[in-house]
Amino acid sequence: MTSSTTASQTELKANRVPLGWRDQCSALLIPLNVCRTQKNFMPWECEHEKHTYEKCQYDDYLRRMKLASKLKAEQVEDA
């Protein structure tokens, strides 16, 4: 299940993304890390990439919480 925000394993390995960061937003993390490296980690230089990555992380969090509450409601119904 890959989406436009999920990078392939070969891309992740080539860009040396740690295992803990290989999630639904991994394709957005790669350009953010490249920008950070090129701009010497100056926080104001990569604001757009950072905002895009953080928005993806937040949307993924909301998706997982909705799924969890739905599963919890189904378990309560079955009991």
Image (spheres, rainbow, N blue to C red):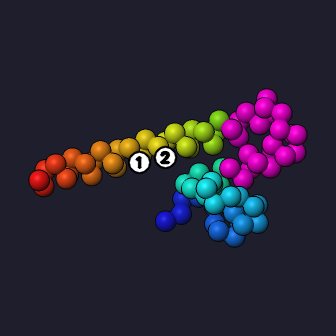
- Of residues 68 and 55, the one drawn nearer to the viewer in this rendering: 68
**Which residue, as the protein is rendered here, is positioned at the far bottom?**
10
Helix, strand or loop at mark 1:
helix
Question: What amino acid type should be assigned to the residue bearing mark 2?
Answer: Asp
Q: Quadrant of residue 44?
A: top right
Mark number, residue 64? 1
User: Marks 2/1: CA distance?
Assistant: 6 Å
The type of residue carrying mark 1 is Arg
Residue placed most toward the observer, 64 or 79: 79
54 drawn magenta: no
* Residue at horizontal 19 percent and vertical 53 percent from the top: 75
Q: Secondary structure at mark 2?
A: helix
Q: Residue at x 59, y 51 (%)?
A: 25
Q: Tell me which secondary structure the magenta stretch mostly adopts.
A: helix
> Residue 30 lies in magenta, yes or no?
yes
Neighbour tally class for label 2: few under 14, some 14-19, many 20 plus, Cα within 10 Å = some
Residues shaded magenta: 29-50
Are the residues at dot 2 and dot 1 in contact (C-beta closer than 8 Å)? Answer: yes
**Residue hosting label 2:** 60
Where does residue 18 sit, x and y in percent of width and height? 68, 58
